[in-house]
Amino acid sequence: MEHETIQRQSFAKTCLKSEVFSHVLFESCDFTQSVLTGARFLECRFVSCNWSLTKIDGTRLQDVSFEKGKCVGVDFSKCDPLFLSLAFTNCLIDTCNFSHLNLKNTPFRACTIKETHFTECNLMNAQFGESNLIGSIFHKSDLTKANFIAAINYSINPLTNKLTKAQFSNPEVLNLLKYLEITIE
């Protein structure tokens, strides 16, 4: 499917294995528990879509953006890492897994990123500005030059993550100190 707009369609519990979508705009579509194994999404936009418990094993997500949508329980670490390019704006990202992925330059703008795992990720230049990262875990990730300005509720251990030239704002930046076992008065 190419150069189409799909609106208010339910793909819930649907199997779209090995389907190819290029330059498709999905608006208010439901992908709850869909199986997208081996599917390819090339330069697609998902606006106000629901990706809850969506299976994306081997799925190619190339220049894909999510806007005002919901991703719950999605294991992005299982998607095809070749050409992976994502963007998130004003999304709920809850209990997802991005571990072991190259997410360099990925924007997560003004999102609620809850209980989500970023283990051994390349997050260089990633944009987390104005996001709420409550309960999310960063472990052994490269956050060089990442932007956390106006982000809240993040918990990042500076001893196990690379933070060179990362940007933070007050007072949230003080959260980085809790791992150093120091007393501030």
Image (cartoon, rainbow, N blue to C red):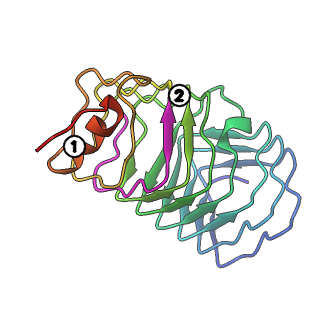
Q: Which of the 4 image quarters holds residue 173?
A: top left
Residue 79: tell me if it is visible: no
Circle 2 is placed at which residue position?
A: 121
Q: Residue at x 84, y 45 (%)?
A: 37
* Residues drawn in magenta: 126-139
Q: Which residue is pictured at 37% across the width and 36% down the height?
A: 126
The quarter in which the C terminus is drawn is top left
Q: Which residue is mark 1?
A: 174
Q: In the image, what residue occupies the spot 59% across and 50% down?
A: 23
What x and y, as percent, mark residue 48?
53, 71
Residue 127, given in percent of the width and then of the height, sits at 34, 41
For image coordinates 28% across by 27% down, the residue present is 145
> Against 80, is 73 above or below?
below
Whether pointer 2 and pointer 1 mark residues with C-beta atoms closer than 8 Å, the reply is no
Indicate the amino acid at tag 2.
Cys
Residue 68, horizontal then vertical, whole percent: 46, 67
